Amino acid sequence: MIELDEFLLKSSIVLLVFYVGYWFLLRKGTHFKLNRIYLLAGLIFSMLIPFLNFQLPSDSTSEIFITLDSIDISANGQLIKQEIEFGFINFLQVFYFSIIFILFTRILIQFYLLLKMFVHSETEMIGDAQVVITNKQNAVFSFFNLVFANRESRNSSDFQAILKHEYVHMVQKHSVDILLTEMLSIVLWFNPFIWFYKKSVKENHEFLADEGVVNNGCSANHYQKVLFEQSTGLHLSLANNFNQSLTFKRLNMMKKIRSNKLAKYKVLLMIPAFLLMIFFVACSKDKDSQIESNNPHETEELVVVAHSETAKDVKNNKSGDEMYPANLAYKKVQKMPQYPGGELELRKFLAINIKYPHEARQAGISGKVFVKFVVNKEGSVDNVSIARGVHSSLDDESVRVVKLLSDWEPGEQDGEKVNVWYTVPINFQLQ
């Protein structure tokens, strides 16, 4: 299952790519139906693509990395950074979900206001539209199959033009787009592009409605006059408002010469970017058998690595060999071994108990040691060895402490307790 932070990052990337494409390729065109499909596709793909995961083949033996928070062992004492980081992460989570709660409550309040307005107002059928006549000084707006209008607007000579505008919103189901955009903006509230995206969706809705009114026989000059004269009233973000601050944009767009048919094919320019985005977001490649990256700027982390032997190999060889050859331990199981108290306690145990060797400190030796071991069926740690060492003193200290890990909850596959390989990198820093 995808983690929340991974979903938010990938979803934001997808949304950004679609918005940049719209801004540079489609925004100034008059193919409004195509623009709507494009913007709606961006919303849908930003929610679906993060869940895709295509594995690319690797030529070498692969390993699965499960990355935990960073842990550093300092020459001046142990730095248990994960406790501070854990508290900060908790704060960010509380803050994130608090904003979500506020924004979601705002949506519920708007639903309540719409429902209250509907219940306490008169309704009448005008053509195929159900019009809710309110006593409030609100602007005319639509929500799904309802058109809300105050009595003054209802009795206006321009009401038919206004109603035609809202009728286009109803027939084309623009409220669906708005609700989808609102929901995604609640989840991605921290991403400024979701707010720009939402604005673009609403602007395009207005362009579509204006186009529909003019195409249905309403005089363009008269309709532009109606647009200009309408006064601002109650604005609900869930609704399609007839009068918005983008009035002048709408007037200019109606005056604009229609884009030629070839202009719609600009969207094809987004195909390479779209494929590259899917490759970046949804595709992953098995890690090379080389455990540590050669990038010196890479963030040092406590990592759990499960070896690449298949589950089939394990089931075909269940001998009790104490050395746990590679084909006697799973690379990944349905229920992974669990250290008492979870990952945080595992990191704390290592950070507290590992001592920076005096010999290495005096010699200025530092680096990352990879300790390999098996969590066996009984929950004990066996076959502890160095997968990649730095210096004998650092290696020995790492092995000493890892051997102290005990009382694991064993891993399970198909309801049966099994052996699982792990590799724990421990980073020794002089400062």
Image (cartoon, helix red, strand yellow):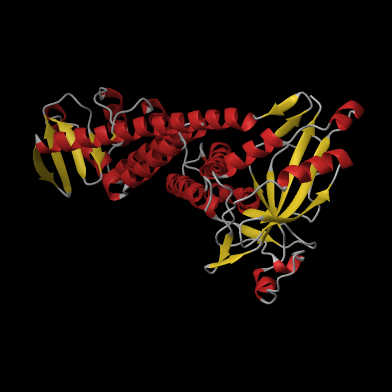
Residue 350 found in image quarter: top right
Return the residue nearer the eye: 49 or 247: 49
Residue 23: image quadrant is: top right
Q: Position of residue 177 (x, y in %)?
A: 37, 45
Horizontal side, residue 154 vs residue 240: left or right: left
Residue at the (89%, 26%) spot, across then down: 362
Front in this rendered view, residue 381 or 44: 381
Q: Is residue 52 above or below residue 424?
A: below
Looking at the image, residue 288 sits to the left or right of residue 245; the answer is: right
Camera sees residue 430 = yes
Foreground pick, 335 / 218 = 335
Q: Residue furthest right?
A: 363
Q: Is residue 294 shown to the viewer in this render?
A: no
Q: Position of residue 347 (x, y in %)?
A: 64, 39
Q: From the viewer's perspective, is residue 411 above or below residue 189? A: below
Q: Is residue 129 above or below residue 296?
A: below
| Horizontal side of residue 104 vs 352, given as left or right | left
Residue 53 sits in quarter? bottom right
The C terminus sits in image quarter: top right
Residue with the most extreme bottom position: 316
Residue at figure coordinates x 15%, y 34% from the top left? 117
Please report the residue visible at 77 percent of the width from the left and 64 percent of the height from the top: 323
Give the number of marks.
0
Residue 48, percent across and down? Answer: 49, 52
